Image (cartoon, rainbow, N blue to C red):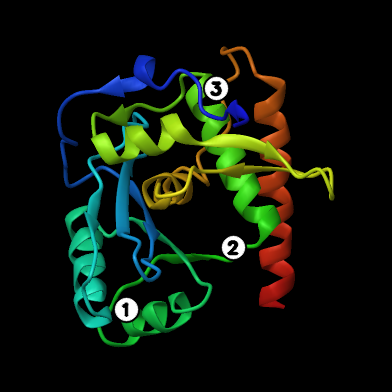
Amino acid sequence: GGANVFRRIKENIWHGRLDIQPNRKYAIGVDLAKLSDFTVITPIDLHNWQVGTPDRFQQLDYPMIESRIEANWRKYNKGTLRIEKNAMGEAVIDHLISDKGVTNIDPFLTTEATKEAALKNLSILLETDQIKIPDFEPLLKELQTARWERNEKTKKIKMTWPDGYHDDCVMSLSFAVWDLARLPVEKPINPLFIEAQKYREASAQQKTIMRI
């Protein structure tokens, strides 16, 4: 296959659990299951950028999935909940708001471009040692097996996983870290990080246009 996507995985593993305090802020990324996939809910502490152990499950009906999302949202101080709004996501978001009283939802519209931007952003955060990830085997396996592949017809390069592998943990994590602040000035800024910032700004503009 192609080249490895994610670098410095082992160097950025941390061991332990998130210390949930009443005054701390969190973001939560949610990747919803499709057919044989898993639903994954990933929290991150916005003060130290440590990622918590994901809640990963499959073969639950949507009312149960919505209850699990709500429970995690309340557990992590009702932090920003970033959920893919494509396909069944729209209905899940509506139910969370109307039936569960969930607020602070930031819907993520996944297109080929926004998915690539979110994954690039994640790879840069790892490569520049900005985030710390949990020692969670399914996530580590997904990060280790992701590859860049070139389509010879279109000449486009995209991220892929080998047959039989999932990408749910990585997508959930990429949603959780999508809106992290820019690197502190005293740290050297990786040019790729600036490139990812442009994707985020473009996405924010697109959201504004959509709201109008």
Q: For residue 110, which numbered disc appears in the image? A: 2
**Distance CA(mark 2)–CA(mark 3):** 28 Å
Whether residues under marks 3 and 1 lie with C-beta atoms below 8 angstroms apart, the answer is: no
In front here: 102 or 56? Answer: 56
Mark 1 is surrounded, within 10 Å at the Cα level, by few (under 14), some (14 to 19) or many (20 or more) other residues, namely some
Q: Who's the residue at 47% across and 51% down the image?
A: 175
**Location of the C terminus (image quadrant):** bottom right
Name the residue carrying label 1. 96
List the residue tagged with mark 3.
184
Q: Which sits earlier in the primary sequence, circle 3 or circle 1?
A: 1
Query: Please, what is the three-letter code of the amino acid marked with disc 2?
Result: Thr
Question: Label 3 sits on what residue type?
Answer: Pro
Say what secondary structure mark 1 lies in.
helix
Which residue is found at the position 70% from the left and 30% from the top?
194
Number of disc labels? 3
- Left or right side of 155 for 182: left
Extreme-bottom residue of the structure? 98
Q: Is residue 152 above or below residue 127?
A: below
